[in-house]
Amino acid sequence: MAKSPDGRAILSKSTFIRGLQCEKSLYLHKNRPFLRDRLSPEQLAKFSRGTNVGIYAQELFPGGIDASPKTHFQMAASVKKTADFIEAGETVIYEAAFEHAGVIIALDILVKDEAGWKAIEVKSSRSISETYLWDASLQYFVINGSGIALCDFSIATIDQEFVKNGPVDPRKLFKIESVLPVVLQRQQTVSEKIESLKEVAVFKSSPRVPIGPQCNHPYPCDFFGHCWKNVPAGSVFDLKGLEEDRKFRYFESGIIKAADIPETELEENTTARQVKSIMLEREVIDLDKLKGFLDRIKLPAAVFSWFDFKPAMPIFEGTKPYQSVPCSFALKGSEVSENQLVLFTTPGFPEREMLEEIIDGMLGFETILVFGLQPDWGFLLKNAGAENALQKKVELLLARSVDLSQPFNDYSIAWPGMRHADAAEEILAGLNQAVLKPGDKIKTRLEAALILEKVALGNLKDDHDKVLRDVEAFHSARVSNTVKLFELARQMAGA
């Protein structure tokens, strides 16, 4: 059995998939881990979500025994534990571990029935991807090679049509689909790829792999900063709205800076305006378009903002997996002081009284400024048991709503760093404006959403009231920054 010099397996599921995506990434992971980009808090939270779904899926086959190691570094002990469980006659094993041909893997659920051993891998997504199929093919190769003859291999995904009605039945929440035919077809390729990637892992120097689409697909690489360090600011990759394939075609042909793109290939009012802003190192504005947008806004105006979370496993009655649960609402007039902010936050659907207060507050303004999408008002009203009068109020406020993100997304305003700016704070910073920061607790909307989801699930160890205050502090700053963005657009237009 091929192993590394310290006796450990060379590859795992994650490193195999990493190697399929990019051999250089695999080499760096194995030999230069200190070059890795730092994981954000929201990325770590996403990983925990997947883990929670996997644990819940164990209820598909209750009564099993857990073979998982205490830490990721004790996988070898888990392999022995799994072998002992099988020898003892266990028929349902969670996190069963196997090692073969220098590869070590852990399977979510291993089950034995009258037909034989069956493998089930659990995913928190709603469909089976190509990556999942390679993952399954590798696991089959290792398990089969270690001496366990599998009669089937399945992938369990979340059924997006499931609607919660009482306690969640895992047999209805998950869809289990056999992928054995595909897995069997890939066994020879898996075997060859394993040997190839094991060689890559012990190379004396990094393989020469140029940057390309593989840097972001199927997953964003965590060595992005290292591999892209020589790409200059103002490159073709900084252009928003330009197809990725086209960017790489420019790059491979020697056109690296956006300013070097031939004028005949620049799209009027979109790419051209961005390129000009990069060359001038400042914003470039289509004054007529911006004024036309602002003419739609009648004063007094207010900014309305909302946060939601989308739990993989539905928490509330009548909801589906990943359905939006709006739970934090904020309203601030564009001409009023900070202490007049109206803000409600709850780790669940708002109660009727809360909805009425925020809707009535919105109707006190001629224009409601939102940044991006609106919440699903129809579902909110249904959930709150609203009657026709409240529904008509929502129709009025929707008619008064204007999306403030429009001039920053339709290239009415272009600036050098616009590709990386999606939130109000990022746009303000890109336009060299001061940004109000709520503190260090929560930095992004997604992070706020994942924290609210944990509160709703009861999985948060911290004080709930304090966490909700942190969310409200972040939300308050977000609304104030959006008001500043509106004022900035007016200044740019000379209003």
Image (tube, rainbow, N blue to C red):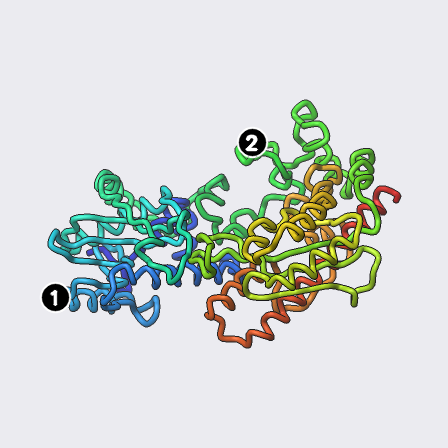
The mark nearer the N terminus, 1 or 2, is 1
Give the residue displayed 25% in from the left and 43% down from the top: 183
Q: Quadrant of residue 124?
A: bottom left
Circle 1 Cα neighbour tier, 10 Å, few/some/many (<14 / 14–19 / ≥20) = few
The secondary element bearing badge 2 is classed as helix
Horizontal and vertical percent position of residue 59: 29, 62
Horizontal and vertical percent position of residue 487: 81, 51
User: Which label number is shown at residue 246?
Assistant: 2
Q: What residue would you read off at disc 1?
A: 89
Horizontal and vertical percent position of residue 334: 80, 55
The secondary element bearing badge 1 is classed as loop
Q: Quadrant of the N terminus?
A: bottom left
Q: Amino acid at mark 2?
A: Arg
Q: Nearer the viewer, residue 79 or 406?
A: 406
314 sits to left or right of 94: right
Horizontal and vertical percent position of residue 273: 73, 34
Farthest residue toward the top? 264
Q: Quadrant of the C terminus?
A: top right
Residue 75, compared with residue 115, is above or below; it is: below
428 sits to left or right of 34: right
**Which dot, 1 or 2, sits closer to the camera?**
1
Give the residue displayed 76% in from the left and 59% down from the top: 332
Farthest residue toward the bottom? 463
Q: Quadrant of residue 256?
A: top right
Circle 2 Cα neighbour tier, 10 Å, few/some/many (<14 / 14–19 / ≥20) = few
For residue 416, say whether it is visible.
Answer: no
